[in-house]
Every structure is written in C-alpha cells, then in structure tokens.
Image (cartoon, grey):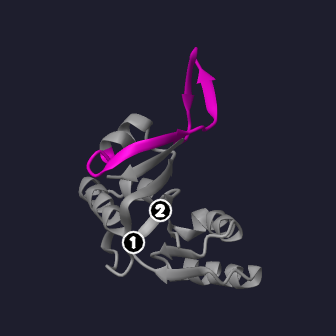
C-alpha cells in the first residue's frame, strides 16, 4: 500500500482530494496550524474521503511516527521556511533531514517552488536525493530572455 505525505494543507488540498480519488489509500496531510487541519477535515468529511488522515505537525520537528512514506508533496512549505528571517539556512537543512526521515529509500519527493530555481533546488537537496524528473511549468519572456516563474521537480531518495 502506497503512503503519501502532503505538507501545508491549505496550499495543497487539491492534492489530497486528487490522490484520494485516484485510489491512494493511505494519505496523510500535515500542517502546523490546527485551524488549517480543522478546515481540511470538514472539507474531507463533506467529500466523503475516509482514506485521508490529518495531523497537526511541524515538519521541522516531525514525529518519528510519520515515516515510511512513498511520496511527499510540497507546494509552498519549503518556500515559507526559506523566507523565515530566523536562521533560514539551518531550517532548510532541518527540512531536508525531516524529509529524509519521512520518506522510504527510493521514495519520491515532489516540490513546487516559486522562490527557487532548478539549480538552487538541486543544490539544496543534493545530499540524499537525486533528480528524477523536471516537470513542465509555464514560461515567460522578458527582455529577450525566457524563464519560469515556478519550478517543479521530482526527487528520489537515494
């Protein structure tokens, strides 16, 4: 049975819903905000999705009970941690450590970031992870150059 961990519920509830409807049967959504958990819980109940567990958790101080996941999806948590003015470098390192503890070996990590380039993310996750796939994202052109406003990568834990 595949286990999936979703970070920051208010940003990715659509992932929870989508994975549940595609047959994932062991989905855990976490957020440090109890109000986000309550809101997501009411939506899940309304949708009749009984295969989703919700937990109030701080990903930087993750419970050891949250481990063994095959997939972890992040759409904003790493960005938010990176913008923290209090010791952001150390918090990013702790994020990678928590992620490594949550995922099985060969597990996948999907990250979508609007603050980091592909190269920067490759550097941040260079220890213990390798790039599996770069997902297509919208591009824009300005001043004769093209770029992306969002980066979406899939890493695999080594």
Query: Which residue sits at x=58%, y=14%?
Result: 144
Q: Which label is found at residue 72?
A: 2
Count residues near mark 2 (Cα–Cα under 10 Å), then give few for <14, some for 14-19, many for 20+: many
Could you give the CA–CA distance between mark 2 and mark 1, rounded to whole angstroms?
Answer: 10 Å
**Position of 9 relative to 73 (above/below):** below
Residue 125 within the magenta-colored segment of the rendering: yes
Label 2: state its secondary structure.
strand
Residue 101 within the magenta-colored segment of the rendering: no
Q: In this picture, which residue range is highlighted in magenta?
A: 124-150
* Quarter of the figure with residue 117: top left
**Position of 37 relative to 112 (above/below):** below
User: Which of 25 and 56 lies nearest the eye of the viewer?
Assistant: 25
Label 1: state its secondary structure.
loop
User: Which of 75 and 84 lies nearest the eye of the viewer?
Assistant: 75
Q: Which label is found at residue 68?
A: 1
Question: What count of labels does the image hold?
Answer: 2
């Amino acid at each position: 049975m595949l286990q999936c961990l979703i970070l920051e519920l208010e940003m990715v509830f659509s992932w929870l819903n989508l994975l549940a409807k595609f047959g994932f049967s062991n989905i855990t959504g976490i957020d440090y905000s109890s109000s986000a958990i309550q809101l997501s819980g009411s939506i899940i109940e309304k949708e009749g999705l009984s295969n989703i567990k919700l937990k109030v958790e701080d990903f930087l101080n993750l419970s050891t009970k949250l481990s063994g996941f095959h997939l972890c999806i992040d759409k904003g948590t790493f960005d938010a941690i990176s913008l923290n003015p209090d010791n952001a470098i150390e918090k990013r390192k702790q994020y990678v450590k928590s992620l490594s503890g949550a995922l099985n070996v060969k597990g996948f990590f999907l990250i979508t970031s609007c603050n980091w380039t592909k190269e920067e993310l490759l550097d941040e996750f260079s220890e213990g992870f390798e790039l599996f796939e770069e997902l297509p994202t919208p591009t824009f052109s300005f001043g004769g150059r093209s770029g992306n406003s969002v980066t979406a990568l899939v890493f695999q834990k080594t």
